[in-house]
Amino acid sequence: MSPAKGGRRKIVHIGIDSGLCHNTRAYAEFAALLREYTDWIEWGDDYAILDVTDNKLDIPFGTRVAKMIKSDIKRQLGWSVSVGLAPSKFLAQLAMERQRPDGLTVVLPEQLGDFLADVPIDRLPGVGAVTRQQFATMQIEYVGALTQVPLNELVRHFGQRGSSFWHLAQGWDDDPVAPAEQLDQIREETSFAAPLYTREEMRDALRELASALCGRLQRRGLQARDVTLEVRYPDFRTATRTSRLAAFTDRAQAVFTTACELLEQTEADDLGTRLLGIGLGGFADEEIEQLDLFASEKP
């Protein structure tokens, strides 16, 4: 059964502050520990996101679950972690970062207004330098200020991205926790509260995804050759397109350019899109070994 949506969700974002997080055996123990609470786990570089709304221990209180997980990690692994609990992935990440290192921040639905009041506007997914400047001309510096802006005004300025920004500022985000990223691929994706229909908006989203993804590559010392684009249409059909680059790369511009070329091969122009994702793979053999942190769990 999939987790609950909307304000009823309880999302835990765990950021690893210190510990043997790149040790294969230790990371396998970490994964096993988290699976005692839920199978809805999304992995990233030195972090994990869990949906504990319907957890295996049937604990109805998200705060208690978050505290238990943090305590178990410290006791069993000796790791220092920061934990954020909130009704969405976006808010849980912000909460996790609020008290680093070794912190625990809980954001309840009724606390969203106060919590987002001083969050910089460029922390919203999809807000880069250009969009931040556009917000500046509207005298908007913080996410909390968006709650005072009419939805139709944001849509007029930013197209359908404006709708996504507005919904995130209200704390409305049903972006699901996606279990288990492929071990031979790393990926980033972004979903939209309302479908995008213009090529400029789609390119802006792909640019942000490519930048985030290549930042992850560079932190891992990896280079990739295969670029995969995922497009989810408003009717929830999904299209996937893949291209192999002429050479390995960790540069965002190369990934962005290829993703845009793959976008041309989809029906996004005609149908619009409610989700865009980029995956990178085709690593050299020795690089795959670095990426495969869960090798010891394979049968």
Image (tube, rainbow, N blue to C red):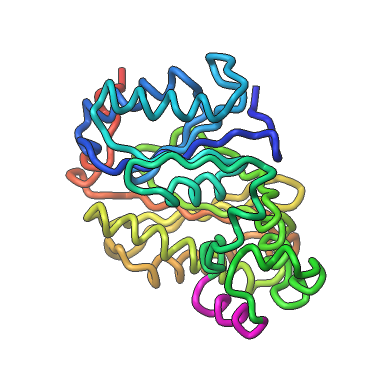
State the residue at coordinates (53%, 67%).
120
Residue 119 on the magenta span: no
Of the 4 image quadrants, the one containing the N terminus is top right
Which residues, given as a range, are shown in magenta?
128-138
Depth check: give the residue in front, 22 or 53.
53
Residue 135 located left or right of residue 186:
right
Residue 239's spot in the image, x, y percent?
Answer: 61, 50
Can the viewer see residue 43 in this picture? no
**Number of disc labels:** 0
Can the viewer see residue 88 in this picture? yes
Residue 110 located left or right of residue 228:
right
State the residue at coordinates (58%, 53%).
115
- Give the residue at the far bottom of this rendering: 137
19, above or below 152, in the image: above
Q: Quadrant location of residue 159?
A: bottom right
Name the chief secondary structure element in magenta.
Answer: helix
Residue 32's spot in the image, x, y percent?
Answer: 36, 21
- Give the residue at the far top of this rendering: 57
State the residue at coordinates (80%, 69%).
150
